[in-house]
Image (spheres, helix red, strand yellow):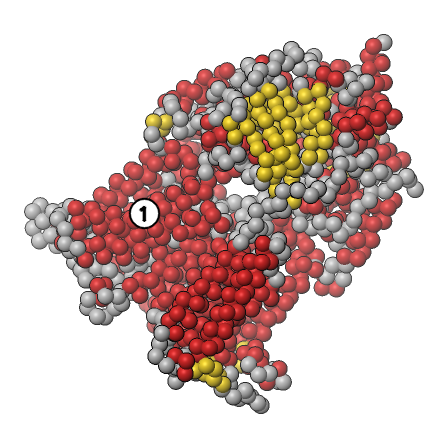
Amino acid sequence: MSTPIVPVTAGTPVDDVPASGAVLGKISYRIPITYAVLAGAALLGLVGTMIGREGAWSQTTEFQSRYGDQWFTIPNFSVPSLLTVILLTVALLAAAVYGYLLTSGRKAVPVWLHIVVGVAFVLAFLTWAGAGKSAVIPVTSLLAGALALSVPLIFGAMSGIVCERSGIINIAIEGQLLFGAFAAAVVASLATAPYLGLVAAPIAGALIGALLAWFAVSYHVNQIIIGVVLNTLVLGLTSFFFSTLLADNSATWNARQPLGVIEIPLLSQIPIVGPVLFRQTILVYLMYATVILLQIMLFRSRWGLRTRAVGEHPKAADTVGIHVNKRRVWNTILGGAIAGLGGAFFTIGSGLAFGREMSAGNGFIALAAMILGKWNPTGALVAALLFGFSKNLGNVLSTIGSPMPSQILLMLPYVITIFAVAGLVGRVRAPAAEGIPYTK
Amino acid sequence: MTESTTPAPEPTPAATSPAPEEDPRSGAAILRKIVGGDVVISFLAIIIALVIGGVLIAFADEDVADTITYVFARPTDFLGAAWTAVSDAYIAMFRGAIFDFQADTFNRAVRPITESMTFATPLILAALGVAVGFRAGLFNIGAQGQIILGGIIAAYIGFAFSLPPVLHLFLAILGGALGGALWGFIPGILKARTGANEVIVTIMLNWIAVYLIAYVLTLGKFNASGTGLRSPQVGPNAAYPPLIPDFLVPGNTFRLHWGFVVAILATVFVWWLLERSTIGFEIRAAGANPHAARTAGMSVGRITVLTLVIAGALAGLAATSQVLIDRGSLTAGVAATYGFDAITVALLGRSRPLGTFLAGLLFGALQAGGTLMQSVTSTPIDIVFVVQSVIVLLIAAPPLVRAIFRLPDPDAPPKRARAAAKEAAA
Amino acid sequence: MKLELQGITKVFGPLVANDHIDLVVEPGEIHALLGENGAGKSTLMNVLYGLYDPDDGQILLDDKPVTFEGPGDAVRAGIGMVHQHFMLVPVFTVAESVALGYEPAGPGGILDLGAARRKVEEISERFGFHVDPDALIEELPVGVQQRVEIIKALSRDARILILDEPTAVLTPQETDELIKIMGELKAAGTSIVFITHKLREVRAIADRITVIRRGKVVGEASPESTETELASLMVGRSVNLAVDKTPAELRDNELVVSDLTVLSGSTPVVDRVSFSVQGGEILAIAGVQGNGQTELAEVILGIDEAAAGSVTLDGKELLGMSVRERLRAGIGFVPEDRSTDGVVSSFSIAENLILDLYDTEPFARGVSMNLGKVAENAEFRTQEFDVRLTDIQDPISTLSGGNAQKVVLAREMSRPLRLLVASQPTRGLDVGSIEFVHKRIVAERDNGTPVVIVSTELDEVLALADRVAVMYRGRIVGIVDAREAGPAGINRDVLGLMMAGVPLEDAVQQAAGHQSTLASADAAADGKDLT
């Protein structure tokens, strides 16, 4: 129909390819330094403390993978402690050197190397902790506990993603988890039906989400402020009712109503991971579904495209007829519901009655997981699992007794999170319009 | 929106219409400003919060629950029970916070107000730290951890050494401030160097501090008792002297101590820092617009570190008011929930020093009153959290409060004049 | 489609942005809406596009009154708009951007990106746009981003297309291409409303011109009107378009930049740039937005870090110094984005006037500030720079763009300067403020200060510069002496070609063989002016 228009670079442009001698940027050695720190910690803290020990070479560490009834199990096995720790430390050192070489050659460090380093360090640590002990290291139950600790974190992180991708900062995850836990426990107890609790929890969370959205969108109140205040509000409300109604008549109001475990045939028989992943309550399966669905919907669906547009450039979304504030309100309510559902894990999901301040800061850690996961469902999943694992590692080791004081072990996950936030990830890119109220 | 900033040709409605714009100095305008302004909004927010708290108290009261079964038959029983529950609770709160009119001696009657000030001291100090952070655009959620660290060091100096009066207290206070400052320095340097989000880092540091204090209490000198729960008591020279000296009142039971004076001094200092010093200028500039601050030659990273160090030091001072007291010692609960309450206090005070001071007094009163209320009625102190958070939520959204009470908006021109302007333009 | 606006009025608080505006756009017409910055053009178009609700008046399409609740309604009615600041999500692909709001989707709302991609390819091919549907928006040059915006509008069957200052980000050659595209759209029956404050463009492009000033229509003009006529209609008085300046008197003090490289990640955004500016002359850095000028200016001040090279001022190396040390060394800096980098909008006018002097005498002694001196300074400076204000303690956000820029200028010129760097010093200002700012900059040069101006506006470059350096993709394509500018030597066409990366000699040759549409229009008009 028409003559094509000449490309933008008319004429003979100057060479685009940088000539030799072009200046290259400074190399960031953050990753190899992190590796080296881990390797150094293993060398001094693990090998160093063992090698002088009497009979160190003859000590062994025993691992156990059996967990509940299974068709076949891998028998417990032992490894020579010192030798294993030394080998793993060497592997860590090698990884640090390899990482350095890659980085100095301006190549990207592959993801598998992160995994190798992580696994090697954890194994070295476990071997060290179990050296010469009669107690075995329960690998499978370690993982199962890690998953359990991660469930509310994962729901919380997904909640954060749904809200923040649309531009609303949800600091109230903590409150939504707590209110979800409360509503699930009370409703399940009153109705003596745990599955009704499963319905109540997201509604409670959504309520907090709606409050957050209302103040943020209608009154333009700073979203971090509303979040912090809502957390206090929920803490006050639930604690108040806990010490009055729930305490006065706990048999009616706060009786334990555990969700039943549903075992998936065949899949639950896989050694080690089978029982961990597929012998769970419906809540955990809902968690899997939420992550998968969110990952797909966020990047492949109309809802996801509009949500991201509203969070990145609300005005652009408005100019194509998308109702920015409506979308934000609904996403925040949905996010609240997801977090509320996660809160149910504390009570009906774990078979416990409601307790004061049950969410215990999980909402904030979920927030950290979301940031570490770069606002991606799978990334946040990995970060939450990492946190759950390190937390459970601390728990398990402090019970089987390790050479390290238990308080220091329990500190570990929080230290690791700081490391991860400052070291490996560094400056991450949040949705551009996050926290900014939209007005025309 | 550069388009909308040009001054338009002024259609002067005053000249053409019979209903000119009101003179802003006229009585009606002044009244509207007062009625719609900050003070009234704050007052009304407190009223609403107390009403909501009252509803909750009535809801959870057993006598009220008994009457609700026959509420339609005899509604007066229900209303009477509810009234009794709520008024009992709030009267107890007043007696605990301000003035105990049932007390038999004057000392006992005025003691509550001094208790409120005692409770307010750590809140004010920690909240000042949070407020300084807010002004620099930093969300310092870490007051809790900063208090703990301040407490550890202040207590150590307090019990491990034996020094002359004044000097010992001074050094212990300084130690507390340093401990808090250290815990503020970590998120500061991490944010400045790596861009690590301070919200996350301070939250993590709170947890680390919780485990750290549990660990420290099991260590040698701290664990003289062997229980791992409580450090030895601080020396008498390291304790804040009572503010109301013994020679003035016989049978002195007042707990209020010189820590409150420290809180007042800190308030004045923070005001000077923010409003009258170059450091405050930098903090405010970096908080309002870090890009412009950098272009103007300020080092935003340095400001971040400095701000969080100051914030931490103030939170550390809060710890001294808990540890450096008569027979005071370090326990794992040294920070109670002061660090988190401080955030709400700073928000309520709109991050202004005087506002934060007053908000701290209010929350201190609620704490003191709530404590008595919990002991003499069946209402748990947790209701105070609800009241506090509702107050802050409402104050953050003045249009909501105005809508509830149908108050005029002081910023909007009155409807009459606006309609006239439209007419004149037509 | 015929568009008619009747008595459109839009009021923001005390400000009447649009005051009973009437406008008729015939089908297949290119109608220019001419007015200076702040005249109310964009407000009017945002009303038309459903973004603002008018306080009075109505919109008619093909003589039928319509009301728009939001942009969705306007789009459905056949109105498309290309905003001055593109409405594109940087992290989306072209296909996603075009699909947004009108997504082809299957069951469960799963996107059919294939369909979106085909739509982009189809329109792109029909008009010869050369746009890759899978490219990320943030990686595209602005010229291409603009085409994406046009594709967006066309994909929704826009029959009235609003282009808001579309040439602000383009090279003259790209502008030519845009004009061609507009011609084709017109031939296909699309009506175009073309918003601009650039006089030369309207004469080359428009069928009819409506001029608005301070929110009111002040007249219609034909494209045959002279620039002077249009200018006086637009501003309301006769304006002196040229800047009065004497030939440069060079001094010995100078800024020398050599082999300067700035990296973003690992790609150079400023690539081995060398130039020098002597006292008493103005060097203008010309080029299309995003070719490294911003970074060059910022690295001189020290906000960006240089990877290699050197910057010396009067023989002293600047690299390695902090921003503060450089400011103390006598650099005056007017940032490109005033509201982001130049002022703290919640601070008072007085505080903004000492934003980079707050810790120096007499405003501070030690760490204690002297607010009396701060206020005194503000009174003095605002008078000196004719800043219109009510109170120096008001937040600077209460000032108009022009007055806020005067505050920035007043601050930067309130200390003895050894170098002035000004980026886009007049962006978004009204003509009166532009004249004032230009005068002050020339006065600084006449004081013997080396001046570096970064500007994407060729008019401004030609008005101010003694020498012009053109940047393209981080490199300096060539430096030309502005005194040689003229039809025979370095003209608009040559600079335009250089802005597209063509080296100086080639550009001169090519320009001799082919004149751009705008230049031809100029020539024609010049001829007419003479007669």
In the rendered structure, the answer to whether residue B122 lies left or right of residue C439 reads left
- Which quadrant is home to the N terminus of chain A? top right
Q: Residue furthest right?
A: A1
What chain does mark 1 sit on?
Answer: B
- Which quadrant is home to the C terminus of chain A? top right
The amino acid type, in three-letter code, at marker 1 is Ala
Q: Residue at x 13, y 48 (%)?
A: B165
Per the image, the residue denoted by label 1 is B313
Determine whether A313 is above or below A370 in the image. Answer: above
Quadrant of res B305? top left
In the rendered structure, the answer to whether residue B384 lies left or right of residue C327 reads left
Front residue of A5/B362: it is A5
Q: Residue at x 36, y 46 (%)?
A: B309
Q: x%, y% of residue A415?
A: 43, 61
Front residue of C131/C240: it is C131
Determine whether B333 is above or below C42 in the image. Answer: below
Q: x%, y% of residue A17?
A: 73, 43
Front residue of A435/C466: it is C466
Q: x%, y% of residue C526?
A: 82, 15
Q: x%, y% of residue A241?
A: 38, 66
Q: Residue furthest bottom?
A: A71
Q: Residue at x 85, y 13 (%)?
A: C528
Residue C161 visible within the image: no
Q: Residue at x 69, y 35 (%)?
A: C475
Front residue of C286/B276: it is C286
Q: Residue furthest top?
A: C531
Quadrant of res B210? bottom left
